[in-house]
Image: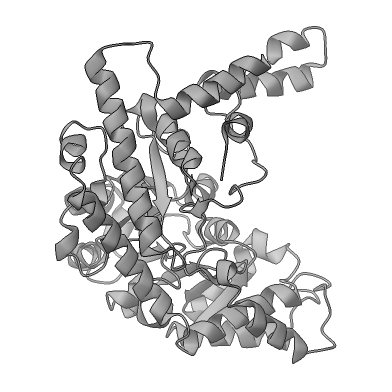
C-alpha cells in the first residue's frame, strides 16, 4: 500500500519556474509561464510511477470487468495470434494505401454484427474517433447541440467542425435540451426547413459524475421538434461498453434504442482491456469518415496485435464469459451503498456535507447502478480524503480542475468485478472513519489541526524542502 513518502512524490509542491529562467530562451520561458498558471492553482498534472501502490485495493483503474486484473483476456488473445502464425507486426501504411487487410475488415464486421449495426470503423483511440466524427460529419450549415459535460475529445473536435452553430444544454437536463433545440430551429432557417441537420452529442455515462444520460427522453424531444429526422444522435459509449446491455453491448442497447441512434462510439481501453475504438453506424457515416476524417485518412492502420486483442475481447463477450462480471459490479456497488447507510456515522456525515454521493440517491429503486461513484466533500478536503484512503490501502484519486469545473473537485471511486464485498466494506468504513475525524476537527475550531494522514504527508514534504 502507499506510504507518506510515496504520496509526497505523487502530490509534490509546485513552485513557479518561469521567474528562474530570466535571460534564457523565451521559447522555454513562455512554456513555463503557461505551466505556472496551473501550478498556482494546484492544477498541474504529473505522471505517477508505482501506481497503484503494490498491495493496495484497486478502486481507481478503468479495468471495469477485471479482464486485465484476472488475465481472462490473455488466452483468447494468444489463441488469436496462434491462429495466424505468419501475422505481420506492423500495418505498413494507412488503410487507404496499403495498410488495410481482410483481418481488419472481418473484425469490423464482427463488431457491427455484435452491436446490431450496419457497419463499423476502427480507430486507434476513442479520442481520435470522437475528433474524427466532429470534424467530418457535421456539414456547413449544420448545428451541434451537446451536453455541457461531454468529453474533452468532443470539444477538441468541435473546435474545428464546419458546423457554424454549436450550442450546449445543461447536463442531463431535458427541459434545457428542448429549449436549446428550439433555439437552434428558430435561428437556423435551413435546419428548420429540413435542408440541414442537428447532431446531438452526449455520453451514455459520464465518467466524472457516474450518471447516465436520459437518452430516451432526449430522443423523444428530438423526434417531436424534428419529425423529419434531421436531428440525429452521437452517443459516446466509452464507459458503458462491456458493462451495460446484453452481453455488454452498451447503454444504447440496454435501453433498447439502438435503431434510433445514428452513431455510437465504443472504446476498448477500459472494460475490454485492449486498445482502440470503433464507430458503429450506417454506411454513409462510415464512408464520410473514410473520405473526410483526416485523422483516419493519414494514420497508419491498426496493427495486427491491436485488432487481435479487440477480437479476443469480443469473443469473451459473445460467449457470455463476462455476464457474471457485469452482475458482480452491480452487486458490489449496491453492497457499498448498503454498507454506508448501515454505518452509524453516514447520516451525520451526509447531513453535515462532509461526505456526499450524488448518484447514491434513490439507489434501491434503480434497476441499474453505475460503476463510477464520485465522493464529494469540502473542496479543500478532497486531497486529505485521498491521502487517508491511500494510507489505508485503498487506491483512488481526486479529480480536479481542469478535468472538472472549478469548485467541483471530487474523489472518483471505480468499482470492478474483481473487487470483493470485504474490500467494499473497508472502503465504506474508511470513508466514515475519515468523516468522523474531520467533523471532530471542525468541532474543535482548531484551524491549525490537520487530519492524521495529511499530517504525515505534509511532514514528509517539509522534511524535503
The front one of 63 and 174 is 63
- Count of numbered marks: 0
Residue 203 visible from this viewpoint: no
Q: Position of residue 459 (x, y in %)?
A: 55, 19
**Residue 123 locus on image (x, y percent):** 62, 67
353 relative to 194, above or below: above
Residue at coordinates 56% horizontally, 87% vertically from top-left?
Answer: 109
When asked about the image quadrant of residue 433, the answer is top left
| Image point (19%, 59%), residue name | 363
Quarter occupied by the C terminus: top right
- Residue 36 appears in the figure: yes
Query: If the image is split into quadrants, where does the N terminus sit?
Result: top right
Scheme of colours in the image: one colour
The answer to whether 75 appears left or right of 166 in the picture is right
Image quadrant assignment for residue 262: bottom left
Question: For this view, does 340 lie left or right of residue 243?
Answer: left
Q: Residue 350: where, in percent of width, then height?
A: 19, 38
Q: Where is residue 39 drawn, in percent x and y?
A: 58, 22
Q: Residue at x 52, y 25 (%)?
A: 456
The answer to whether residue 299 is above or below residue 9 is: below
In this view of the protein, which residue sits in the foreground, 417 or 298? 417
Q: Quadrant of residue 310?
A: bottom right
Task: From this view, report whether residue 259 is shown above or below residue 230.
Answer: below
Tell me what residue is drawn at x 77 percent, y 22 percent.
Answer: 28
Amino acid at each position: 500500500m502507499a506510504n507518506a513518502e510515496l504520496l509526497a512524490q505523487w502530490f509534490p509542491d509546485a513552485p513557479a519556474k518561469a521567474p528562474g529562467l530570466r535571460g534564457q530562451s523565451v521559447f522555454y520561458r513562455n512554456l513555463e509561464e503557461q505551466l505556472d498558471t496551473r501550478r498556482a492553482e494546484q492544477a498541474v498534472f504529473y505522471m505517477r510511477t508505482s501506481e497503484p501502490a503494490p498491495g493496495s485495493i484497486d478502486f481507481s483503474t478503468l479495468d471495469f470487468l477485471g479482464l486485465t486484473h484476472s488475465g481472462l483476456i490473455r488466452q483468447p488473445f494468444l489463441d488469436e495470434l496462434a491462429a495466424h502464425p505468419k501475422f505481420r507486426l506492423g500495418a505498413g501504411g494507412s488503410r487507404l494505401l496499403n495498410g488495410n487487410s481482410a483481418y481488419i475488415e472481418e473484425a469490423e464486421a464482427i463488431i457491427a454484427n455484435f452491436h446490431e449495426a450496419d457497419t463499423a470503423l476502427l480507430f486507434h483511440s476513442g479520442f481520435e474517433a470522437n475528433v474524427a466524427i466532429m470534424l467530418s460529419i457535421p456539414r456547413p450549415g449544420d448545428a451541434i447541440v451537446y451536453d455541457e459535460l461531454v468529453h474533452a475529445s468532443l470539444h477538441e473536435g468541435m473546435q474545428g467542425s464546419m458546423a457554424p452553430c454549436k450550442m450546449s444544454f445543461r447536463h442531463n437536463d431535458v427541459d434545457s435540451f428542448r429549449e436549446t433545440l428550439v433555439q437552434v430551429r428558430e435561428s437556423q432557417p435551413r435546419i428548420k426547413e429540413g435542408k440541414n441537420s442537428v447532431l446531438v452529442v452526449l455520453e451514455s455515462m459520464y465518467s466524472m459524475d457516474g450518471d447516465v444520460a436520459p437518452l430516451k427522453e432526449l430522443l423523444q424531444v428530438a423526434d417531436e421538434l424534428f419529425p423529419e429526422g434531421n436531428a440525429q444522435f452521437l452517443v459516446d459509449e466509452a464507459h458503458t461498453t462491456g458493462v451495460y446491455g446484453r452481453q455488454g453491448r452498451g447503454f444504447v442497447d440496454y435501453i433498447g434504442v439502438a435503431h434510433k441512434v445514428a452513431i455510437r462510439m465504443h472504446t476498448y481501453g477500459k472494460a475490454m482491456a485492449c486498445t482502440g475504438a470503433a464507430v458503429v453506424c450506417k454506411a454513409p457515416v462510415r464512408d464520410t469518415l473514410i473520405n473526410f476524417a483526416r485523422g483516419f485518412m493519414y494514420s497508419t492502420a491498426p496493427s495486427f496485435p491491436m485488432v487481435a486483442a479487440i477480437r479476443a475481447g469480443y469473443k469473451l463477450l459473445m460467449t457470455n464469459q463476462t455476464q457474471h462480471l457485469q452482475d458482480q459490479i452491480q452487486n458490489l456497488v449496491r453492497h457499498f451503498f448498503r454498507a454506508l447507510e448501515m454505518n452509524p456515522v453516514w447520516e451525520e456525515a451526509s447531513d453535515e456535507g462532509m461526505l456526499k454521493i450524488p448518484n447514491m440517491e434513490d439507489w434501491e429503486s434503480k434497476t441499474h447502478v453505475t460503476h463510477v461513484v464520485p465522493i464529494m466533500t469540502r473542496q479543500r478536503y478532497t486531497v486529505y480524503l485521498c491521502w487517508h484512503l491511500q494510507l489505508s490501502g485503498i487506491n483512488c484519486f481526486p479529480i480536479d480542475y481542469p478535468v472538472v469545473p472549478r469548485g467541483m473537485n471530487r474523489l472518483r471511486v471505480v468499482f470492478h468485478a474483481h473487487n470483493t464485498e470485504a474490500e467494499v466494506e473497508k472502503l465504506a468504513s474508511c470513508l466514515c472513519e475519515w468523516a468522523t475525524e474531520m467533523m471532530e476537527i471542525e468541532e474543535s475550531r482548531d484551524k491549525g489541526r490537520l487530519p492524521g494522514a495529511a499530517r504525515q504527508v505534509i511532514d514528509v514534504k517539509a522534511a524535503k524542502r
